[in-house]
Amino acid sequence: MPKNSTFYLEAYHRTPEQAQLVQATAELTLPAALCKQAQAAIVQWQHYQPTAMHELNHLAKHYGLASLHCKDEGTRFGLGSFKALGGAYAVSLFAKTAGQTVACATEGNHGRSVAWGAQRAGVDCVIFLHEGVSTAREEAISRYGARIIRVPGTYDDAVRECARLSAQEQWQIISDTSWGDYQDIPKFVMAGYSIMAEEIQAQLSAPPTHVFLQGGVGGLAAAMMACLGRAWPEAAICYIVVEPRYAACLQASARAEGQYRSTPGPFHTVLAGLACGEPSTAVLPLIYQRSQLYLALDDEAIKQAMIQYARPLADDPRIIAGASGAAGLAGLLVLQGVCELKKQVNLDKHSRVLVINTENDTDPAAYRAMIG
Protein backbone atom coordinates (compact mmCIF):
# COMPACT_ATOMS: atom_id res chain seq x y z
CA MET A 1 0.00 0.00 0.00
CA PRO A 2 1.48 3.42 -0.95
CA LYS A 3 2.49 5.19 2.24
CA ASN A 4 1.29 8.61 1.12
CA SER A 5 -2.27 7.69 0.21
CA THR A 6 -5.02 9.34 2.22
CA PHE A 7 -8.44 7.95 3.02
CA TYR A 8 -11.77 9.27 4.19
CA LEU A 9 -14.74 7.15 5.20
CA GLU A 10 -18.24 8.54 4.98
CA ALA A 11 -20.42 5.92 6.67
CA TYR A 12 -24.13 6.23 7.37
CA HIS A 13 -27.16 4.02 7.83
CA ARG A 14 -29.82 4.38 5.16
CA THR A 15 -33.33 4.06 6.52
CA PRO A 16 -36.27 3.48 4.13
CA GLU A 17 -36.96 7.21 4.32
CA GLN A 18 -33.39 7.98 3.37
CA ALA A 19 -33.59 5.53 0.48
CA GLN A 20 -36.61 7.38 -0.85
CA LEU A 21 -34.69 10.61 -0.52
CA VAL A 22 -31.85 9.11 -2.53
CA GLN A 23 -34.27 8.07 -5.29
CA ALA A 24 -35.73 11.56 -5.38
CA THR A 25 -32.26 13.11 -5.49
CA ALA A 26 -31.24 10.76 -8.29
CA GLU A 27 -34.26 11.80 -10.36
CA LEU A 28 -33.52 15.47 -9.73
CA THR A 29 -29.84 15.04 -10.61
CA LEU A 30 -30.37 12.91 -13.70
CA PRO A 31 -33.99 12.34 -14.78
CA ALA A 32 -34.78 8.86 -16.11
CA ALA A 33 -36.53 10.35 -19.14
CA LEU A 34 -33.33 12.12 -20.23
CA CYS A 35 -31.43 8.86 -19.97
CA LYS A 36 -33.94 6.96 -22.09
CA GLN A 37 -33.83 9.73 -24.69
CA ALA A 38 -30.03 9.61 -24.82
CA GLN A 39 -29.89 5.83 -25.03
CA ALA A 40 -32.41 5.71 -27.86
CA ALA A 41 -30.33 8.23 -29.83
CA ILE A 42 -26.85 6.85 -29.21
CA VAL A 43 -27.63 3.24 -30.13
CA GLN A 44 -28.52 4.58 -33.59
CA TRP A 45 -25.12 6.17 -34.10
CA GLN A 46 -22.88 4.57 -36.70
CA HIS A 47 -20.47 2.03 -35.19
CA TYR A 48 -22.29 1.85 -31.87
CA GLN A 49 -21.70 -1.36 -29.98
CA PRO A 50 -21.52 -2.18 -26.26
CA THR A 51 -18.04 -2.06 -24.82
CA ALA A 52 -16.52 -5.16 -23.26
CA MET A 53 -17.10 -6.42 -19.73
CA HIS A 54 -13.96 -8.27 -18.65
CA GLU A 55 -13.86 -10.90 -15.92
CA LEU A 56 -10.68 -10.71 -13.82
CA ASN A 57 -11.11 -14.09 -12.19
CA HIS A 58 -7.54 -14.66 -11.09
CA LEU A 59 -7.19 -11.20 -9.58
CA ALA A 60 -10.49 -11.69 -7.75
CA LYS A 61 -9.27 -15.01 -6.34
CA HIS A 62 -5.94 -13.43 -5.37
CA TYR A 63 -7.74 -10.84 -3.23
CA GLY A 64 -10.42 -13.16 -1.90
CA LEU A 65 -13.37 -11.65 -3.77
CA ALA A 66 -16.38 -13.46 -5.18
CA SER A 67 -15.87 -11.72 -8.54
CA LEU A 68 -14.18 -8.75 -10.17
CA HIS A 69 -15.45 -7.22 -13.41
CA CYS A 70 -14.04 -4.36 -15.45
CA LYS A 71 -16.21 -2.38 -17.85
CA ASP A 72 -13.73 -1.31 -20.54
CA GLU A 73 -14.57 2.04 -22.17
CA GLY A 74 -11.28 2.31 -24.04
CA THR A 75 -12.85 1.37 -27.38
CA ARG A 76 -15.91 3.64 -27.24
CA PHE A 77 -16.48 5.02 -30.79
CA GLY A 78 -12.73 5.03 -31.37
CA LEU A 79 -12.29 8.06 -29.10
CA GLY A 80 -10.57 6.16 -26.29
CA SER A 81 -12.89 6.94 -23.39
CA PHE A 82 -16.43 6.94 -22.00
CA LYS A 83 -16.54 10.69 -22.62
CA ALA A 84 -17.44 9.92 -26.25
CA LEU A 85 -20.98 9.26 -25.02
CA GLY A 86 -21.62 12.56 -23.26
CA GLY A 87 -20.09 15.54 -25.01
CA ALA A 88 -20.95 14.45 -28.54
CA TYR A 89 -24.53 13.66 -27.51
CA ALA A 90 -25.01 17.09 -25.93
CA VAL A 91 -23.60 18.73 -29.06
CA SER A 92 -26.16 16.85 -31.17
CA LEU A 93 -28.93 18.44 -29.09
CA PHE A 94 -27.65 21.98 -28.63
CA ALA A 95 -25.71 22.74 -31.82
CA LYS A 96 -28.20 22.62 -34.65
CA THR A 97 -27.88 26.18 -35.92
CA ALA A 98 -25.74 26.79 -39.01
CA GLY A 99 -22.70 28.85 -38.16
CA GLN A 100 -22.98 28.14 -34.44
CA THR A 101 -19.87 27.58 -32.36
CA VAL A 102 -19.64 25.17 -29.42
CA ALA A 103 -16.99 25.43 -26.75
CA CYS A 104 -15.74 23.66 -23.65
CA ALA A 105 -12.82 23.38 -21.28
CA THR A 106 -11.20 19.98 -20.96
CA GLU A 107 -8.31 17.87 -19.74
CA GLY A 108 -8.57 15.99 -23.04
CA ASN A 109 -11.27 13.33 -23.31
CA HIS A 110 -14.37 15.52 -23.00
CA GLY A 111 -12.91 17.99 -25.48
CA ARG A 112 -12.25 15.22 -27.95
CA SER A 113 -15.89 14.14 -27.67
CA VAL A 114 -17.20 17.69 -28.13
CA ALA A 115 -14.91 18.26 -31.12
CA TRP A 116 -16.02 14.96 -32.67
CA GLY A 117 -19.65 15.86 -32.06
CA ALA A 118 -19.15 19.29 -33.60
CA GLN A 119 -17.57 17.75 -36.68
CA ARG A 120 -20.53 15.38 -37.01
CA ALA A 121 -23.00 18.25 -36.56
CA GLY A 122 -21.16 20.56 -38.97
CA VAL A 123 -20.57 23.37 -36.47
CA ASP A 124 -17.43 25.17 -35.33
CA CYS A 125 -15.71 24.19 -32.11
CA VAL A 126 -13.36 25.94 -29.67
CA ILE A 127 -11.62 23.94 -26.97
CA PHE A 128 -9.94 25.52 -23.94
CA LEU A 129 -6.91 23.67 -22.56
CA HIS A 130 -4.95 24.62 -19.48
CA GLU A 131 -1.17 24.77 -19.63
CA GLY A 132 -0.67 21.25 -18.27
CA VAL A 133 -2.57 19.37 -20.98
CA SER A 134 -0.16 17.31 -23.07
CA THR A 135 0.58 17.97 -26.72
CA ALA A 136 -0.67 14.48 -27.58
CA ARG A 137 -4.11 15.25 -26.14
CA GLU A 138 -4.20 18.61 -27.93
CA GLU A 139 -3.37 16.97 -31.25
CA ALA A 140 -6.06 14.32 -30.72
CA ILE A 141 -8.65 17.09 -30.33
CA SER A 142 -7.33 19.15 -33.23
CA ARG A 143 -7.84 16.21 -35.60
CA TYR A 144 -11.56 16.90 -35.47
CA GLY A 145 -11.11 20.49 -36.65
CA ALA A 146 -11.36 22.23 -33.30
CA ARG A 147 -9.65 25.53 -32.56
CA ILE A 148 -7.49 25.33 -29.44
CA ILE A 149 -7.09 28.11 -26.87
CA ARG A 150 -4.45 27.60 -24.17
CA VAL A 151 -5.13 29.04 -20.71
CA PRO A 152 -2.57 29.58 -17.92
CA GLY A 153 -3.28 27.69 -14.71
CA THR A 154 -5.45 24.65 -13.99
CA TYR A 155 -8.50 22.98 -15.50
CA ASP A 156 -10.71 25.17 -13.32
CA ASP A 157 -9.03 28.29 -14.77
CA ALA A 158 -9.80 26.96 -18.25
CA VAL A 159 -13.46 26.46 -17.27
CA ARG A 160 -13.70 30.08 -16.13
CA GLU A 161 -12.02 31.45 -19.25
CA CYS A 162 -14.29 29.32 -21.45
CA ALA A 163 -17.34 30.74 -19.66
CA ARG A 164 -16.06 34.33 -19.98
CA LEU A 165 -15.14 34.22 -23.65
CA SER A 166 -18.18 32.15 -24.64
CA ALA A 167 -20.47 34.76 -23.09
CA GLN A 168 -18.61 37.48 -24.99
CA GLU A 169 -18.69 35.63 -28.34
CA GLN A 170 -22.09 33.97 -27.84
CA TRP A 171 -20.68 30.47 -28.14
CA GLN A 172 -22.66 27.51 -26.82
CA ILE A 173 -20.84 25.89 -23.89
CA ILE A 174 -20.99 22.09 -23.80
CA SER A 175 -19.53 21.38 -20.38
CA ASP A 176 -19.55 18.25 -18.24
CA THR A 177 -19.49 20.32 -15.05
CA SER A 178 -22.10 22.72 -13.64
CA TRP A 179 -21.77 26.04 -11.84
CA GLY A 180 -24.00 29.00 -10.96
CA ASP A 181 -26.81 29.25 -13.51
CA TYR A 182 -25.16 26.77 -15.88
CA GLN A 183 -26.96 23.58 -14.79
CA ASP A 184 -28.92 22.00 -17.63
CA ILE A 185 -26.49 20.88 -20.35
CA PRO A 186 -24.30 18.80 -17.97
CA LYS A 187 -27.41 16.70 -17.28
CA PHE A 188 -27.58 15.79 -20.96
CA VAL A 189 -23.87 14.97 -20.92
CA MET A 190 -24.47 12.62 -17.98
CA ALA A 191 -27.51 11.18 -19.75
CA GLY A 192 -25.12 10.08 -22.50
CA TYR A 193 -23.10 8.21 -19.89
CA SER A 194 -26.22 6.33 -18.81
CA ILE A 195 -25.88 3.89 -21.68
CA MET A 196 -22.96 2.36 -19.78
CA ALA A 197 -25.31 1.44 -16.94
CA GLU A 198 -27.72 -0.18 -19.38
CA GLU A 199 -24.91 -2.25 -20.86
CA ILE A 200 -23.60 -3.15 -17.40
CA GLN A 201 -27.01 -4.44 -16.32
CA ALA A 202 -27.17 -6.62 -19.44
CA GLN A 203 -23.61 -7.90 -19.03
CA LEU A 204 -23.68 -8.87 -15.35
CA SER A 205 -25.68 -11.84 -14.08
CA ALA A 206 -26.04 -10.24 -10.63
CA PRO A 207 -25.76 -6.67 -9.32
CA PRO A 208 -22.36 -5.63 -7.98
CA THR A 209 -21.97 -5.23 -4.25
CA HIS A 210 -19.17 -2.66 -4.63
CA VAL A 211 -18.55 -0.13 -7.41
CA PHE A 212 -15.34 1.91 -7.54
CA LEU A 213 -15.89 5.19 -9.41
CA GLN A 214 -13.54 7.90 -10.63
CA GLY A 215 -14.15 11.30 -9.05
CA GLY A 216 -13.15 14.35 -11.09
CA VAL A 217 -16.01 16.87 -11.15
CA GLY A 218 -18.43 14.05 -10.29
CA GLY A 219 -20.36 13.55 -13.54
CA LEU A 220 -19.46 9.90 -14.07
CA ALA A 221 -19.95 8.98 -10.42
CA ALA A 222 -23.36 10.63 -10.22
CA ALA A 223 -24.53 9.11 -13.50
CA MET A 224 -23.57 5.60 -12.40
CA MET A 225 -25.10 6.03 -8.94
CA ALA A 226 -28.38 7.23 -10.42
CA CYS A 227 -28.59 4.68 -13.23
CA LEU A 228 -27.27 1.58 -11.47
CA GLY A 229 -29.63 2.41 -8.63
CA ARG A 230 -32.51 2.35 -11.10
CA ALA A 231 -31.25 -0.84 -12.73
CA TRP A 232 -31.08 -2.68 -9.39
CA PRO A 233 -33.38 -0.75 -7.03
CA GLU A 234 -33.32 -3.49 -4.38
CA ALA A 235 -29.53 -3.94 -4.35
CA ALA A 236 -27.46 -2.44 -1.56
CA ILE A 237 -24.54 -1.23 -3.69
CA CYS A 238 -21.55 0.30 -1.93
CA TYR A 239 -20.11 3.15 -3.99
CA ILE A 240 -16.46 4.11 -3.46
CA VAL A 241 -15.15 7.34 -5.00
CA VAL A 242 -11.50 7.55 -6.06
CA GLU A 243 -9.68 10.87 -6.59
CA PRO A 244 -6.12 12.20 -6.86
CA ARG A 245 -4.55 12.94 -3.50
CA TYR A 246 -4.23 16.69 -4.12
CA ALA A 247 -7.44 17.20 -6.17
CA ALA A 248 -9.99 15.47 -3.95
CA CYS A 249 -12.77 18.04 -4.21
CA LEU A 250 -15.53 15.44 -3.75
CA GLN A 251 -13.90 14.20 -0.57
CA ALA A 252 -13.53 17.77 0.65
CA SER A 253 -17.23 18.36 -0.04
CA ALA A 254 -18.14 15.16 1.80
CA ARG A 255 -16.19 16.34 4.82
CA ALA A 256 -18.43 19.43 4.71
CA GLU A 257 -21.55 17.21 4.81
CA GLY A 258 -22.12 17.46 1.08
CA GLN A 259 -21.67 21.20 0.77
CA TYR A 260 -19.57 22.62 -2.07
CA ARG A 261 -15.85 22.71 -1.31
CA SER A 262 -12.96 23.24 -3.70
CA THR A 263 -9.32 22.24 -3.50
CA PRO A 264 -6.61 24.65 -4.67
CA GLY A 265 -4.21 23.91 -7.52
CA PRO A 266 -1.82 23.44 -9.11
CA PHE A 267 -2.45 19.70 -9.31
CA HIS A 268 0.70 17.66 -9.85
CA THR A 269 -0.70 14.23 -10.68
CA VAL A 270 -0.66 11.68 -13.48
CA LEU A 271 -4.46 11.63 -13.17
CA ALA A 272 -4.93 14.35 -15.77
CA GLY A 273 -8.60 13.56 -16.35
CA LEU A 274 -9.39 13.78 -12.62
CA ALA A 275 -7.29 16.83 -11.71
CA CYS A 276 -10.28 19.03 -10.90
CA GLY A 277 -10.40 21.32 -7.90
CA GLU A 278 -14.02 22.44 -8.25
CA PRO A 279 -16.82 19.84 -8.26
CA SER A 280 -19.95 20.04 -10.35
CA THR A 281 -22.48 21.66 -8.04
CA ALA A 282 -25.47 19.73 -9.39
CA VAL A 283 -24.16 16.28 -8.48
CA LEU A 284 -22.92 16.86 -4.93
CA PRO A 285 -26.15 15.94 -3.08
CA LEU A 286 -26.47 12.57 -4.83
CA ILE A 287 -22.80 11.66 -4.47
CA TYR A 288 -22.85 12.58 -0.78
CA GLN A 289 -25.96 10.49 -0.12
CA ARG A 290 -24.78 7.43 -2.03
CA SER A 291 -21.03 7.24 -1.42
CA GLN A 292 -19.78 5.19 1.51
CA LEU A 293 -16.07 5.74 1.05
CA TYR A 294 -13.80 8.34 -0.53
CA LEU A 295 -10.22 7.46 -1.42
CA ALA A 296 -7.59 10.07 -2.31
CA LEU A 297 -4.63 8.25 -3.87
CA ASP A 298 -1.12 9.21 -4.82
CA ASP A 299 0.38 8.58 -8.25
CA GLU A 300 2.26 5.42 -7.30
CA ALA A 301 -1.00 3.64 -6.55
CA ILE A 302 -2.30 4.61 -9.98
CA LYS A 303 0.82 3.40 -11.75
CA GLN A 304 0.63 0.04 -9.99
CA ALA A 305 -2.96 -0.40 -11.14
CA MET A 306 -2.02 0.47 -14.73
CA ILE A 307 0.71 -2.17 -14.57
CA GLN A 308 -1.72 -4.70 -13.10
CA TYR A 309 -4.04 -4.16 -16.04
CA ALA A 310 -1.18 -4.37 -18.56
CA ARG A 311 0.44 -7.44 -16.97
CA PRO A 312 -2.49 -9.50 -15.69
CA LEU A 313 -2.43 -12.60 -13.53
CA ALA A 314 -2.51 -15.92 -15.41
CA ASP A 315 -5.05 -15.77 -18.23
CA ASP A 316 -6.97 -12.70 -17.04
CA PRO A 317 -7.43 -10.34 -20.02
CA ARG A 318 -4.86 -7.63 -20.70
CA ILE A 319 -6.46 -4.19 -20.51
CA ILE A 320 -4.98 -0.93 -21.78
CA ALA A 321 -5.87 1.61 -19.10
CA GLY A 322 -4.66 5.19 -18.93
CA ALA A 323 -4.08 6.81 -15.56
CA SER A 324 -7.65 7.95 -15.03
CA GLY A 325 -8.91 4.65 -16.39
CA ALA A 326 -6.96 2.73 -13.76
CA ALA A 327 -8.13 4.81 -10.79
CA GLY A 328 -10.98 2.47 -9.81
CA LEU A 329 -8.74 -0.57 -9.74
CA ALA A 330 -6.13 1.45 -7.84
CA GLY A 331 -8.72 2.15 -5.17
CA LEU A 332 -9.50 -1.55 -4.86
CA LEU A 333 -5.83 -2.57 -4.66
CA VAL A 334 -5.02 0.05 -2.02
CA LEU A 335 -8.08 -0.87 0.03
CA GLN A 336 -6.81 -4.44 0.31
CA GLY A 337 -4.13 -3.17 2.69
CA VAL A 338 -6.49 -1.28 5.02
CA CYS A 339 -8.32 -3.92 7.05
CA GLU A 340 -10.46 -1.52 9.06
CA LEU A 341 -11.85 0.19 5.94
CA LYS A 342 -12.42 -3.17 4.23
CA LYS A 343 -14.42 -4.27 7.24
CA GLN A 344 -16.48 -1.09 7.32
CA VAL A 345 -17.54 -1.45 3.69
CA ASN A 346 -17.85 -5.27 3.91
CA LEU A 347 -15.31 -5.98 1.20
CA ASP A 348 -14.82 -9.74 1.55
CA LYS A 349 -15.21 -13.17 -0.07
CA HIS A 350 -18.85 -12.44 -0.87
CA SER A 351 -18.12 -9.19 -2.73
CA ARG A 352 -18.90 -8.75 -6.41
CA VAL A 353 -16.75 -5.79 -7.43
CA LEU A 354 -17.16 -3.59 -10.50
CA VAL A 355 -14.52 -1.16 -11.77
CA ILE A 356 -14.66 0.96 -14.93
CA ASN A 357 -11.68 1.54 -17.19
CA THR A 358 -12.72 5.00 -18.30
CA GLU A 359 -9.91 5.55 -20.83
CA ASN A 360 -7.22 3.75 -22.78
CA ASP A 361 -3.77 5.16 -23.61
CA THR A 362 -5.14 8.54 -24.74
CA ASP A 363 -1.60 9.88 -24.29
CA PRO A 364 0.49 6.96 -25.63
CA ALA A 365 3.90 8.33 -24.64
CA ALA A 366 2.79 9.03 -21.07
CA TYR A 367 1.23 5.57 -20.88
CA ARG A 368 4.43 3.84 -21.99
CA ALA A 369 6.47 5.86 -19.51
CA MET A 370 4.20 4.92 -16.61
CA ILE A 371 3.97 1.19 -17.20
CA GLY A 372 7.70 0.90 -17.91
Image (tube, grey):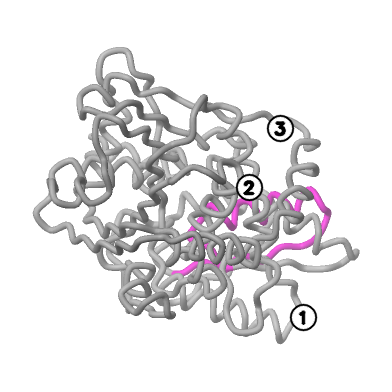
Q: Nearer the viewer's eye, disc 1 or disc 2? A: 2
The amino acid type found where label 3 is placed reads Tyr
Q: Pick out the residue farthest to the right.
A: 98
In this view, the mark in front (2 or 3): 2
- Are dots 1 and 2 in contact, CB under 8 Å? no
Residue carrying label 2: 194
Viewed as shown, does residue 347 lie left or right of 81?
A: left
Camera-side mark, 1 or 3: 3
Q: Quadrant of the C terminus?
A: top left
Does the magenta portion include 118?
Answer: yes
Q: Which residue is situated farthest in the left direction here?
A: 3
Task: Say which residue appears at 38% left-offset and 48% top-offset.
Answer: 238
Residue 54 drawn above or below residue 344? above
Query: Whole-percent x and y of residue 98?
Result: 90, 64
Instruction: Decide: few, some or many residues near mark 3? Use Cα within 10 Å; few <14, some 14-19, many ≥20.
Output: few
Write down the residue under mark 3: 48
Q: Which residue is mark 1?
A: 170
Front-most of residues 96 and 287: 287
Give the residues in magenta.
105-130
Q: Are marks 2 and 3 in contact (CB under 8 Å)?
A: no
- Residue ID at (49%, 52%): 137
Q: Is residue 191 left or right of residue 66?
A: right
Question: Which mark is first along the chain, 3 or 1?
Answer: 3
